[in-house]
Image (cartoon, helix red, strand yellow):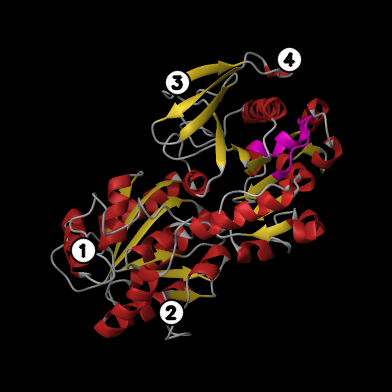
């Protein structure tokens, strides 16, 4: 089974959001289960490849100078990198002010056209695309390979000038979107299978609001739309082997978590305390409910609880959190940016982990937190619904605390319930154990993808 897997980002080469981690984890597990996967990515930074060779591909003239090289990457293995004009930028999508690059339309349409040329040349058994950045590939292919399009989020659809439909060679009318060209809309219409990154998100996007204008097209897919939750790389996110944390531990020996907690308190400059530490590792965007967290801070001292946040994104939201940390240094600590090592320390050292997302196609952080025995407090949306069971609603199976209200009152109530549970060692340990022993790996989700590949291609892969 040969799969051409195209994505605009993949950890560790290019990491902006959950797409990078999800793509890397899925490909790794697919390969472990016998699938021959070739990754195709934009060549943003000139990554080093061993056994490198340059590939000649026939791309449309409008693409301009195009360089394609393939080889072995030290982490990602078999990798093909595509360079088209404007691709080598310090950030894949935005400038230093957080604004999208002015030529993102040309950059990713050219990338998609090149992926299509590689598909036509290599004739894989399955073509797997991800989000709007590669969805337009289906409008450029001449060889109609069985195709899968994964929707990691409908929040970004890549809508651009209608003139771009003129360069498409297949199904151009499917990309028409209220007088513009919408790559994701076209990809949804043309793909043989569309995968949403959790079962609940697959249901949510069928209605106005969560469907973000595409609900009609998604409804029309019928059984061609499926929901498969993401996983996490349990070789990387594993408290028993994690090299970044103060002391390793597992579900049978959790004493090490206290050492990790003590380290987190020290990093924040906090004195030893029994008040639960609430962790948050996030992008600072409205979707993640950062404003809800900020509005809830006034209730922390009374709970009592402390908040430790790692995040980057909106300058305004960063300022809000920095100001809260300045005003209440004993209650709030904020580190702006992304620090992989610190993220591991937060997952290991926090008692609770908060994710009050307005929408969350799947979410990875709640699964990473549970793998470390850090109890999640989440809103009942998207993949959070599929992965976190409320411990008050189901005392036998609960793994966290869930609120149906995406607002300050709902979050504060869920936090209060979580803090109360922390005071009862036996109950806290039971919730932790259930969270830690669940299989959050990619093995099951990857197997479901393989089932789809086999159905579409008629080829069986090794079991």
Helix, strand or loop status at disc 2: loop
- Of the numbered discs 1 and 4, the one sitting upstream in the chain is 4
69, 246: nearer the viewer: 69
Circle 3 is placed at which residue position? 51
330, 149: nearer the viewer: 149
In magenta stretch: residue 285? no
Of marks 2 and 3, the one in the foreground: 3
Of marks 3 and 4, the one in the foreground: 3
Q: Is residue 305 above or below residue 396?
A: above
- Of the numbered discs 4 and 2, the one sitting upstream in the chain is 4
Which residues are the magenta region? Answer: 134-147
Residue 306 located left or right of residue 96: left
Q: CA distance from mark 1 to mark 3?
A: 45 Å
Circle 1 is placed at which residue position? 261
Q: CA distance from mark 2 to mark 3?
A: 49 Å
* Image quadrant occupied by the N terminus: top right
Circle 4 is placed at which residue position? 61
Q: Quadrant of residue 259?
A: bottom left
């Amino acid at each position: 089974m040969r799969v051409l897997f195209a994505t605009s980002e993949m950890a560790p080469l290019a990491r902006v959001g959950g797409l990078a981690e999800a793509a890397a984890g899925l490909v790794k597990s697919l390969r472990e289960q016998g699938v021959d996967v070739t990754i195709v990515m934009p060549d943003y930074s000139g990554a080093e490849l061993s056994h490198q060779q340059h590939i000649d591909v026939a791309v449309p003239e409008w693409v301009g100078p195009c360089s394609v090289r393939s080889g072995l990457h030290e982490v990602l293995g078999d990798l093909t990198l595509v360079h088209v004009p404007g691709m080598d930028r310090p950030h894949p999508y935005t400038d230093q002010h957080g604004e999208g690059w002015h030529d993102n339309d040309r950059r990713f349409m050219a990338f998609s056209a090149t992926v299509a040329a590689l598909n036509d040349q290599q004739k894989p058994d399955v073509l797997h695309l991800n989000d709007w950045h590669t969805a337009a590939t289906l409008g450029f292919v001449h060889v109609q390979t069985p195709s899968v399009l994964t929707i990691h989020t409908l929040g970004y659809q890549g809508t651009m000038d209608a003139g771009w439909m003129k360069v498409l060679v297949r199904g151009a009318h499917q990309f028409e979107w209220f007088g513009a060209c919408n790559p994701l809309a076209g990809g949804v219409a043309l793909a043989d299978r569309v995968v949403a990154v959790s079962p609940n998100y697959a249901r949510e996007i069928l209605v106005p609001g969560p469907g973000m204008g595409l609900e009609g097209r998604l409804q029309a897919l019928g059984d061609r739309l499926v929901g498969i939750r993401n996983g996490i790389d349990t070789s990387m996110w594993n408290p028993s082997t994690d090299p970044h944390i103060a002391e390793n531990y597992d579900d049978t020996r959790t004493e090490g978590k206290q050492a990790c907690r003590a380290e987190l308190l020290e990093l924040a400059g906090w004195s030893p305390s029994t008040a639960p530490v609430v962790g948050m590792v996030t992008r600072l965007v409205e979707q993640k409910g950062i404003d809800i967290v900020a509005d809830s801070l006034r209730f922390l001292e009374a709970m009592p609880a402390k908040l430790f946040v790692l995040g980057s994104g909106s300058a305004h939201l960063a300022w809000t959190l920095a100001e809260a940390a300045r005003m209440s240094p004993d209650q709030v600590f904020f580190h702006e940016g992304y620090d992989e090592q610190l993220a591991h320390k937060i997952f290991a050292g926090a008692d609770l982990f908060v994710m009050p997302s307005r929408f969350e196609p799947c979410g990875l952080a709640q699964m990473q937190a549970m793998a470390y025995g850090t109890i999640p407090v989440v809103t009942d949306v998207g993949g959070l619904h599929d992965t976190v069971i409320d411990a008050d609603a189901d005392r036998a199976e609960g793994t966290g605390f869930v609120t149906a209200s995406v607002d300050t009152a709902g979050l504060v109530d869920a936090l209060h319930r979580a803090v109360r549970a922390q005071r009862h060692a036996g109950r806290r340990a039971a919730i932790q154990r259930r969270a830690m022993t669940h299989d959050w790996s990619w093995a099951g989700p990857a197997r479901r993808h393989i089932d789809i590949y086999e159905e579409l291609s008629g080829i069986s892969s090794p079991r």
